[in-house]
Amino acid sequence: MTEIQMFMSYVHAIWQSLTDGRRRNERGAVTPETVIWTAILAAGAIAIGGIIISKFTGAANSIPTGP
């Protein structure tokens, strides 16, 4: 089996798993708990990103560039 054939079977399997649930209408419900956890994780990621950016900016500003 060539790499292209392996890739195509992988894509086909993923496509089947995604479309199979739509045919059976098994989408599931979004619970408030899922929404809360998603919001917490998103807020944490934004906070960590802000900390990293501020650290990089502070370090970049401390580099002497003048004569």
Image: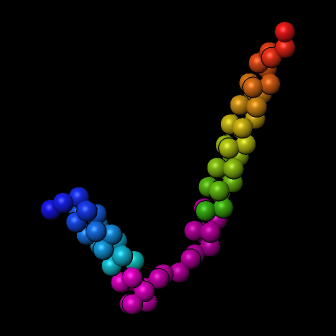
Q: To which quarter of the image does residue 15 belong? A: bottom left
> Which quadrant, please, contains the C terminus?
top right
Which is nearer the eye, 65 or 58?
65
Q: To which quarter of the image does residue 66 belong? A: top right
Which is nearer the eye, 8 or 34?
8
63 in relation to 56, above or below? above
Residue 24: within the magenta? yes
Prevailing SS of the magenta stretch:
helix
Q: To which quarter of the image does residue 3 belong? A: bottom left
Residue 31 position, x and y percent, is 57, 75
> In percent of the image, x 73 and y 42: which residue is there?
50
63 in relation to 35, above or below? above
> Which quadrant, please, contains the N terminus?
bottom left
Q: Is 21 left or right of 54, judged from the image as shown?
A: left
Image: magenta residue range: 19-37
61 in relation to 41, above or below? above
